[in-house]
Amino acid sequence: MNKHFLKLSFFSIVLLGCQNIAAQTADQSKEDLSTYRVTAQKVNDLIHTKLEVSFDYGKKYLYGKEWVTLKPHFYETETLTLDAKGMDFKEIAIVDGKKNTPLKYTYDGEQLFITLDKKYKSTEKYTIFIDYTSKPDELKVKGSAAITDAKGLYFINPEGKADKPIQIWTQGESESSSAWFPTIDKPNQKTTDEIIMTVDAKYVTLSNGKLTSQKTNNDGTRTDTWKMDVPHAPYLFMMAVGDFKIYKDSYKGKEVNYYLEPKYAPYAKQIFGKTPDMMAFYGKILGVEYPWVKYSQIVARDYVSGAMENTSATLHGEHVQKTERELLDDNQESTIAHELFHQWFGDYVTAESWSNLTMNESFATFGEVLWHGHDAGQDAEDRSRYEKLQNYLRSQKNGISPILARFYYKERDDMFDNISYSKGSIILYALKNQMGDEAFFKSLELYLKTNAYKTGEPHQLRLTMEEVSGKDWLPYFNQWYYKGGNPILDVNYRYADGKVTISVNQTQDSSVEPFSLPLKVDFYVNGTKITKDILIDKKEQSFSFELPAKPTFIDLDPDKILVGEIIVNRKTAADYLFQYKNAPSYYNRIEALKFSAKDKSAESQQIALAGLTDQQDDLRVMSIRGIDLRDNQVKDAALKTLLDIAKNDKKTNARAAAILKLASTGDASYKALMQESIKDQSYYVIAAGISGLTKYAPEEADKALAALDADTKDHVAPLLKRFNNQK
C-alpha cells in the first residue's frame, strides 16, 4: 500500500510509496511492550468466498448474501468465529445440499460466533450461508495516520451533487474488509472468491480476478460477476462502482486496464502507460511472471490513503489522475511501481502478520527504487534510494528507532510507517549489495515460488538466501530486522609516515548496540582510486593503510549502502568540491550541494555553479537556489546557464526555479522572459513568470493572473503562495 506521507519539495508534491507514510520521530513511535502480537491462530481456514451484493445509496447500505466455504485447519471444531463489523443479520445457516439449516450464533458488533451443526475434521469442508446488511457509515471506527478511515466500504457523493462523481469503493487494509462482508479478516488467511455485484446499468464495476459475466436486468440494473480462481487474503478483496472510462492495454496476452473519470480518460496512457514495461521488468528480475489473470488500476475520489494493491486491481487516490498539463509538472510513477511490485510481495506471498509487514511494504518501496534504475539509469536509482534514506532518518533520533519486524505495537496501523517502508527498503538494498545481484534475486525467486499463494516472514526469506548463497545470514537479519535503530559514525582521517588512519566512533544512543558494518573505502591518490574493505564492528575502531601519497579525498562507503549516518570531521569546502566533481555519486553530489547552500563561501559557490548542469533536476533546482548572485563573479558565471535553464530545461521545476532566480536580480532585461513564461503550458512556469513579473510591474502581473482561464488560475494560485513564502 502506498500510504500517507506527502513530501513537499521545492516545486513538486511526491507521494511516497503505497500509502502516505506517516512521518514519525523516534519519540512519537515508542513501542507498546505490554502485548506480544502473535500471528493469528488458524482454527478454521477460508477456502472460497462467494458474495452477492447490491447497494442502497440513500442509506449507504450494502445488502449481501454470502456463501463462505471453510475447513478446520488441523484440530476438529464445532465453532466458527467470523469478523463482521456493525452488520445486521437476517439468516445464518449451514448449507446442506440444496437446503439451508439455521445455526445458532451470538454477535458482539465486531465478531460473529457461530455454533456449527456438528464437529468437523480437517478433511471436511463446510459452507455457511449469511444474509446480511453492511452499514459502514454507522460504524464507530477510527483511522490512523496511514489509513485515515476504517469503514471498509465508501459511498462517494451518493446524493449526486455536482461537485464530484458518484462512486462506491472499498478499502480492506488492514482489517476493514470485514466491514462489508463476514470473513476471517487476518493476513494469514487466503481464499478464492466470486463477487456478484448488481448495480445501476450505467455504471462500470471492478473487482479482483476476471469479469466472467454481465447480465442486464429488467429494472435498469446490471449484474456483473467477477471471479478470482486462486487464493488471496481477505484484506485484498475490492469492489469499485462508478462512471469510469476504461483504457485497454495488455501484457503478454493479459488484460491491463486503466479506469479513470471521463475527464481524464484521454490521458490514461500518459498516466499509466509504463505499466506493461514495469510488469515485464519485475517478472524478469524476480524469475516469476506477473501472477494474476489481469491487472487493472482505478482512480477513486476521497480515498483514505495513497493507493492500495488489491489483488489484480489496484486502487489509487485522485492525486494520480492528471491532465496532460498537470503531467508536465508531476507524475505518480513511484506509486504506480510500488503498487505493482506488491502484486508479488504482499499479494502473491503475503506477510503472515502485521508484525511482518516488512515483507510487503519494504519490498514494494524497494521495487520503486529498482524501477527508477531500470527506467532512467543508476543515478535515478540512487536518487530514489537517497530519498528513502532521508525519509527514514527523519523518523529516528540519535539512532533510536523502532524494530523493523516488531511484535510489540499499540495499533496494527502503526506498522505503516517509515520503518516498514523506507528503512526496510534500504536494508534490502544493502543486503543486495552484500550478496551480489545474482544471489539476491535468485533468493527472491526461490522465496516467491516456495511460498506462492501463501504467507511469509523474514526468517523464510533468510532461509532461502542461505540455501542459495551457502552463507549464514542470521547475523544480518538479527541486526537489521529484529533490533531497532541505526549507526551514527563519527569519522576522523589522519595521514602520517605514508599511512592513512581512519578512526571511527559509533556515537548513536547508548541504548542502540554497536553495529557490524562491512564497508568499502575509496582513497583518491595521485589521480587514481584505491579501494579497501573494512569491517566496523566495535564502538571505537581505527584502520590504517599504507598509501603512496597523501590522499586528496577519502570516500567512506562509496556504494552508499549504510543505513545510518556518517559524520566526517574537519571536512572542507575543497573536499566537497572534489567529491562533487571526482566522486560523483548522487549521494556525494547532493551532500556537496547541501554543504554549499549552508557555507556560502567562494569555494562553495563553485559547487553550486557546477550543480547548475547536474543530470538530476532536483539537484539543478538546489543549485539554482544556492547560487549567490550578489557575488559579481558568481553572477557572471551563472547567468548564461540560468537563462538557458529558464528557457530550455526539460524539467518544469528547474525552469521555474531559474525564472524566479533571474527575477530576483531585478534586471529589467528579464522582464520579457517573465512575460513569455506566462504563455507556457506548465503551471509551474506560469506561476514563476507571474511571480517574477511582480518584481518589474506588479499591476501587469495582477492583470496576467486575472486573465488566466479558470483551470489555470486554480493551479497557479497555490503555487504563487508557495513561491511568495519562499522569498
Image: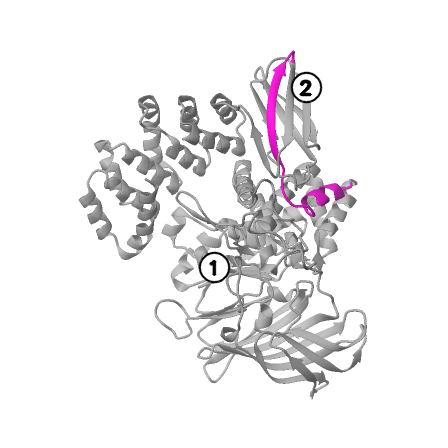
- State which mark lies toward you, 1 or 2: 2
Q: CA distance from mark 1 to mark 2?
A: 54 Å
Q: Position of residue 394 (x, y in %)?
A: 53, 44
Residue 490, image x and y in percent?
60, 30
Q: Total marks drawn?
A: 2
Q: Is residue 442 magenta?
A: no
Question: How packed is label 1: few (under 14 Cα within 10 Å), some, or many (20 or more)?
Answer: some
| Residue designated by label 1 | 317
Q: Using the image, tell me which numbered label, if any, was put on residue 79.
A: none
State the mark number for residue 545: 2
On the question of residue 197 being in view, the answer is: yes
Q: Is residue 226 in sight in this rendering?
A: no
Q: Is residue 683 shown left or right of residue 98?
A: left
**Which image quarter is the N terminus in?**
bottom right
- The quarter of the picture where residue 585 lies is top right
- 680 or 309: nearer the eye? 309
Q: Amino acid at mark 2?
A: Phe
Q: Callout 1, which amino acid?
A: Gly
Query: Regarding mark 1 in the picture, which secondary structure is present there?
Result: strand
For mark 2, does the 10 Å Cα neighbourhood hold few (<14), some (14 to 19), or many (20 or more) residues?
A: few
Q: Kindly state the secondary structure of the residue where label 2 is placed.
A: strand
- Sequence-first disc among 1 and 2: 1
What is the residue that sits farthest to the top in this orientation?
497
Region of the chain picked out in magenta, as a range: 472-498
